[in-house]
Amino acid sequence: TVEKPWTGRFTEPTDAFVEAFGASVGFDQRMYKQDIRGSIAHARMLAHVGVLTEAERDDIIRGLTKIEAEIEAGDFQWSIALEDVHMNIEKRLTDLIGDAGKKLHTGRSRNDQVATDIRLYLRDEIDSAIAPELKRLQGNLIDLAEREADTIMPGFTHLQTAQPITFGHHMLAWNEMLQRDAERLQDCRKRINVMPLGSAALAGTTYPIDRDFAAEELGFERPTRNSLDGVSDRDFAIEFLSWASLLLMHMSRFSEELILWSSSQFDWVDLGDAFCTGSSIMPQKKNPDVPELVRGKSGRVYGHLTSLLTLMKGQPLAYNKDNQEDKEPLFDTIDTVKGCLRVYADMMARIQVKPDNMREAARRGFSTATDLADYLVRKGVPFRDAHEIVGKAVKLGVDTGRDLSEMKLEELQQFSGAIGEEVFEVLTLEGSVAARDHVGGTAPEQVKTGVQAARALL
Ligand code: ARG
């Protein structure tokens, strides 16, 4: 049996099931790099203030470096009896280097250690994967917007044809959401990037520690300001899960649109064979699995947010073992977000749009009715009257199965004498989108400007 580092006051061994029930090593071992980095910084700090000798510090660093290599090579023996990643590594260090290893935990507790590890881990994931993948997805959406700046589609309200828009404009709308997500992520990172190490169990420590030294070693902005809060604060994780929930809400909305657009009823886009699957029974099927899965995964991320909020709400200060339950929701959210961003970035780089079908859909839904009303207003007709006049023209179109642009001038003139020959320019889809030529409008020229602006923010 493995010897635990805290058995001094115990006379009976831990119940075997309790040992397995309480162990977190199965899932917290993924923080081994951060645990080792944190321990090295702690050892350097202890040597810096004279609590460890330089020789002890160097032995610790050598030992931890060896352990990191063992873990990476798959040679490390993880033990459930040693509960978590922290005690597994510390025990191995003592086996490797003896007494110096036993001194590593001086002035430290697993409570500030784990809080530090999680922050380092989350920061690493944001910097190395999440932020770059989000940016890659944005870049691909912006490129697509540029390619399709002139492509006309019907814009919807109530999922009913509203007015013609450009596909590029629609892609830039998605990018706006992601741009806010990118900015929110960096804001959230500020509150992740503070260091609890030095809070010890809850009250701080009697050793002359230099927390600024350790914070600088680990690239933290500053040490946390209160030791009780330092060990028990998980706001940063909840903020990240809220961030992820917003991101997934956006991605779920995109997914909903892509699923509709790739149906045979719409047939506006082809997501590519590499991103779809077939049916085991229906030979004709090509299913939009990727957007469906992403839409579905929003549910698990919202669930994790609720888990963590609920985990924290009943806890008195300071650390409680409940907190061990913070990791799985957080880790699963990180994995889920990374997966969704990656697959979306790849998919959006290869999506094929079908401009003819989108254009045809825009032509069918009286999407230029507002343009006709605006035309009448320019001729001096009050807007409310113009609205009524065009409504009557639309009624005729519905009854006779024709678009406004397909009616004869005399037919339109029976609704208003103000209508002249030039009305047919107003009723074209190209004229309609080109006319919305102001900041934030759908005109192709605005899309091109918007593309440059969006790139500049990346
Ligand atoms: N595995 C623990 C966790 O994840 C580490 C901290 C344990 N601290 C303690 N006092 N039992 O929270």
Image: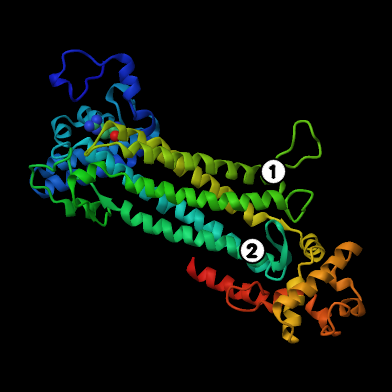
Would you place residue 359 above or below residue 82 in this image? below
Image quadrant containing the N terminus: top left
Q: Is residue 36 visible?
A: no
Of callouts 1 and 2, which one flags the residue occurring earlier in the amino acid sequence? Answer: 2
- The location of residue 396, given as percent across then percent down, is 87, 67
In the displayed structure, does residue 87 sit left or right of residue 286? left
Mark 1 element type: loop
- The location of residue 373, given as percent across then percent down, is 75, 76
* Residue shown at 62% from the left, 75% from the top: 446
In the displayed structure, does residue 47 sit left or right of residue 397? left
- The location of residue 78, given as percent across then percent down, is 34, 26
Question: Which quadrant of the figure has residue 2?
Answer: top left
Q: Is residue 81 visible?
A: yes
**402 and 171: which one is in front?**
402
Number of numbered markers: 2
- Amino acid type assigned to the residue bearing label 2 in the image: His
**Disc 1 and disc 2: Cα gap in Å?**
23 Å
* Residue shown at 46% from the left, 42% from the top: 333
Crowding near pointer 1: few (<14 within 10 Å), some, many (20+)? some
**168 and 89: which one is in front?**
168
Determine the residue located farthest toward the top in the rendered image. Answer: 12
- The location of residue 336, given as percent across then percent down, is 50, 42
**435 and 383: which one is in front?**
383
* Residue shown at 32% from the left, 39% from the top: 313
Residue hosting label 1: 276
Check if mark 1's residue and mark 2's residue have beta carbons within 8 Å.
Answer: no
Label ID, residue 170: 2
- Amino acid type assigned to the residue bearing label 1 in the image: Cys
* Residue shown at 30% from the left, 30% from the top: 84
Ligand 1, what quadrant? Answer: top left
Question: Which quadrant of the figure has residue 117?
Answer: top left
Question: Which quadrant of the figure has residue 38?
Answer: top left
